């Protein structure tokens, strides 16, 4: 489900706010969400199979014993409130026209929702999984060998996680390196069956667009919200801020590098974001026992990777 579908309980006002902000937040807009309880079972699919399924007439079927690989996970909770002293409401005693007051309140709600959306999208990429944060892509597949990965993360072993990262030594100021990056992205898409999303920082996405124009691999697409998105070699790009995925990372001995993620963005058997809420909203209350009206936005979510072949990282790319 997309963000609007998973947040179906929003009232008209909150839905309008979401529609205003969604064009800004590419990854939230393009991500897949699924319903899960606050504490939920993360079931990493590590099925194994042997031999061929071909059999002789009246022969037995090939049987492979499977075992569950379940972990108990919890959603990360993001909540923000703002308050406005109800003395502001007394302005209606002076000017009965509520339009200015309504405009003020609406602007505060837009800013509140914007603030929580910024943090949630950033943590979808860079969340540490600690200090009440969700687990983001950068900390699921680290730019490291097996020893540098988090063994057992989401039910996967460190060697399995390390195999989903490819560290390059490329400089995008060099045309030959640009050509190699195009090949590496094609190979990464082959490593992610059904790959349908590239996640890149703003500067990286701009450079990919330039490379794609030169190689006639650039196009524009329309997402499920009717928003125009950049497309690289038939795969849409979710552009996130350079603040979380820019050219500021260390990669081995190299500095000032960036990464690209190739995902199978899917509710099941892919990368998605579990939530029991979607975006939740509570308008300014009018409880007479309080001196201020309070508005509240919240979003409870965490990253789910049901199958490890749904994510691949290309790291070590220099500007």
Image (tube, rainbow, N blue to C red):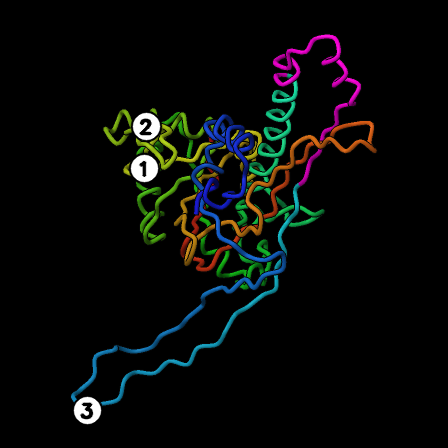
Crowd band around label 1 with a 10 angstrom C-alpha radius: few (<14), some (14–19), many (20+)? some
In the rendered view, tell whether residue 160 sits above or below residue 203: below
Q: Quadrant of residue 87?
A: top right
In the rendered view, tell whether residue 212 sits above or below residue 310: above
Q: Quadrant of residue 299?
A: top right
Residue at image coords 69%, 47%:
132
Marks 1 and 3, Cα distance to the nearest angstrom?
Answer: 49 Å
213 left or right, relative to 203: left
Query: Do tag 1 and tag 2 residues touch (Cβ < 8 Å)?
Result: yes
Q: Secondary structure at mark 3?
A: loop
Crowd band around label 3 with a 10 angstrom C-alpha radius: few (<14), some (14–19), many (20+)? few
Range of magenta residues: 79-103
Toward the viewer: 302 or 216? Answer: 302
Please give the residue where the numbered disc 3 appears in the rendered image. 58
Measured as percent of width and height from the top left, residue 148 is found at: 59, 53
Query: Do tag 1 and tag 3 residues touch (Cβ < 8 Å)?
Result: no
Q: Secondary structure at mark 2?
A: helix
Q: Which mark is residue 239?
A: none
Please give the residue where the numbered disc 2 appears in the rendered image. 211
Residue at image coords 34%, 83%:
63
**First in sequence: mark 2 vs mark 3:** 3
């Amino acid at each position: 489900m997309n963000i609007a579908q998973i947040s179906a309980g929003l009232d008209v006002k909150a839905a309008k706010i979401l529609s205003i902000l969604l064009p800004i937040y590419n990854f939230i807009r393009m991500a897949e969400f699924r319903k899960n309880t606050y504490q939920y079972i993360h079931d990493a699919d590590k099925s194994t199979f042997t031999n061929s399924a071909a059999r002789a007439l009246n022969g037995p079927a090939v049987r492979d014993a499977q075992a569950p690989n379940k972990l108990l996970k919890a959603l990360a909770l993001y909540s923000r409130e703002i308050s406005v002293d109800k003395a502001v409401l007394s302005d209606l005693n002076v000017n009965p026209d509520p339009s200015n007051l309504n405009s003020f309140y609406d602007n505060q709600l837009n800013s509140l929702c914007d603030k929580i959306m910024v943090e949630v999208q950033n943590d979808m990429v860079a969340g540490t999984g600690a200090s009440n944060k969700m687990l983001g892509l950068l900390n699921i597949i680290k730019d490291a060998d097996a020893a540098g990965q988090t063994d057992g993360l989401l039910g996967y072993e460190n060697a399995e996680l390390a195999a989903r990262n490819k560290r390059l030594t490329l400089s995008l100021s060099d045309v030959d390196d640009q050509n190699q990056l195009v090949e590496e992205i094609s190979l990464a898409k082959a490593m992610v069956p059904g790959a349908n999303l590239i996640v890149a920082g703003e500067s990286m996405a701009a450079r990919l667009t330039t490379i794609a124009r030169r190689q006639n691999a650039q196009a524009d697409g329309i997402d499920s919200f009717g928003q125009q998105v950049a497309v690289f070699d038939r795969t849409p790009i979710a552009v996130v801020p350079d603040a979380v995925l820019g050219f500021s990372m260390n990669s081995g001995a190299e500095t000032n590098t960036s990464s690209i993620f190739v995902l199978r963005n899917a509710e099941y058997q892919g990368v998605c974001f579990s939530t029991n809420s979607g975006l939740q909203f509570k308008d300014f209350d009018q409880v007479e026992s309080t001196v201020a009206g309070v508005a509240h936005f919240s979003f409870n979510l965490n990253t789910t990777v049901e199958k490890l072949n749904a994510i691949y990282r290309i790291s070590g790319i220099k500007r």
